Image (cartoon, grey):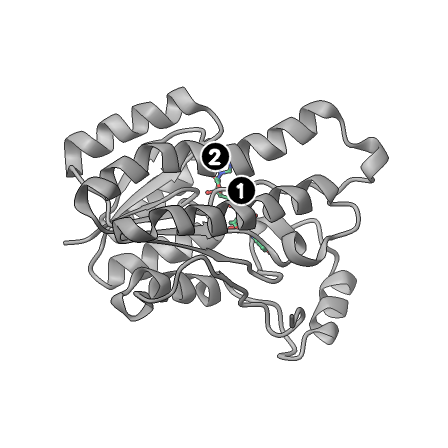
């Protein structure tokens, strides 16, 4: 049975991924940071294993990997999905908010890969899937720190893909458009309607739209794809 670690697997896109991967026969490790109840619900639905860790904290990630190594020995797929967002004028963003954004969205991915990559190199195989955002590609007003952190996810993906290709490991990135999760709870109905109007496919995305792309990037069907940024976004951004 293949094993997948999904950071932020308790809610939103990560939850949809946990459900889909479990349905496809994967053993799912559901990481979360704060909301144990949400993570337990996903575990009940998927038969998955819940492990708490703040991805931005290297010690916390090390402890999670001690458990993973003890219980599973190897990881076939890692999905760096955990992330935070914040809407604020640039001039109001504090240093602490900037640091927290980068700790979770960028250093989180670094901390996870530092632990996962040696395991995958040992197996000479593995699939790493990072999650950025269309705002990392085109930039979002009032989300400078979020947009910058997601651009960093894309640069990290491209560089690590070059380094790990000879070891049989692929590294790809998904840059979702606007998806209906709690991350967008602050958007008004008017704002959502405007986004739908601007989107050629005339809707916002569902968590499952993204989970399906994750499943593809984890499958053998994607074996010749690495270092790529794939953007399921309904056409709102076409490069
Ligand atoms: P969400 O509904 O807010 O869920 C976020 C998940 O990440 C939760 O499971 C949360 O767990 C976890 N998490 C947050 N901080 C964490 C930390 N420090 N350590 C471990 N887990 C942490 O978000 P989402 O919309 O599903 O977003 C998932 C990813 O897609 C993010 O990287 C986001 O930036 C990206 N994305 C989302 C959209 C969108 O429109 N929704 C668009 C583009 C990209 P707890 O509740 O336990 O903290």
Q: Which residue is mark 1?
A: 83
Classify mark 2: residues with Cα within 10 Å, few (<14), some (14-19) or many (20+). many
Q: From the Cβ of disc 1, is ligand 1 less than 8 Å away?
A: yes
Q: Quadrant of residue 199?
A: bottom right
- 178 left or right of 36? right
Q: Nearer the viewer, residue 193 or 113?
A: 113
Q: Residue at x 55, y 48 (%)?
A: 155
CB-based contact (under 8 Å), mark 1 and mark 2: yes
Say what secondary structure mark 2 lies in. Answer: helix
Q: Residue at x 59, y 33 (%)?
A: 102
Q: From the Cβ of disc 2, is ligand 1 less than 8 Å away?
A: yes
- 156 left or right of 50? right
Mark-to-mark CA distance, 1 and 2: 9 Å
Rendering coords of residue 26 (x, y %): 22, 55
Rendering coords of residue 117 (x, y %): 31, 39
In the rendered image of this protein, does residue 161 appear above or below residue 224?
A: above
- 42 left or right of 76? right
Image quarter hosting the N terminus:
bottom left
Image quarter hosting the C terminus:
bottom right
Rendering coords of residue 12 (x, y %): 49, 52
Q: Residue at x 72, y 67 (%)?
A: 195
Q: Which residue is mark 2?
A: 108
Q: Quadrant of residue 226?
A: bottom left
In the rendered image of this protein, does residue 19 appear above or below residue 89?
A: below
């Amino acid at each position: 049975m293949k094993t997948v670690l999904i950071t932020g697997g308790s809610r939103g896109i990560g939850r949809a991924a946990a459900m889909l991967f479990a349905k496809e026969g994967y053993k799912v490790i559901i990481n979360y940071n704060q909301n144990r109840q949400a993570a337990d619900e996903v575990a009940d639905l998927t038969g998955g294993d819940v492990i708490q860790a703040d991805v931005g904290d290297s010690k916390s990630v090390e402890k999670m990997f001690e458990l993973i190594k003890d219980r599973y020995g190897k990881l076939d797929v890692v999905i760096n999905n955990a992330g935070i967002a914040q809407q604020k004028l640039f001039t109001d963003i504090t240093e602490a908010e900037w640091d927290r954004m980068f700790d979770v969205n960028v250093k989180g991915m670094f901390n996870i890969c530092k632990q996962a990559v040696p395991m995958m190199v040992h197996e000479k195989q593995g699939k790493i899937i990072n999650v950025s955002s269309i705002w990392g590609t085109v930039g979002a007003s009032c989300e400078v720190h979020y947009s910058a952190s997601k651009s960093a996810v894309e640069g990290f993906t491209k560089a690590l893909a070059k380094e790990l290709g000879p070891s049989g490991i692929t590294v790809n990135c998904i840059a979702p458009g606007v998806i209906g999760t709690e991350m967008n709870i602050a958007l008004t109905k008017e704002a959502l309607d405007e986004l739908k109007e601007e989107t050629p496919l005339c809707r916002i995305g569902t968590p499952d739209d993204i989970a399906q792309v994750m499943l593809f990037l984890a499958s053998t069907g994607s074996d010749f794809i690495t270092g790529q940024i794939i953007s399921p976004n309904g056409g709102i951004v076409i490069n």
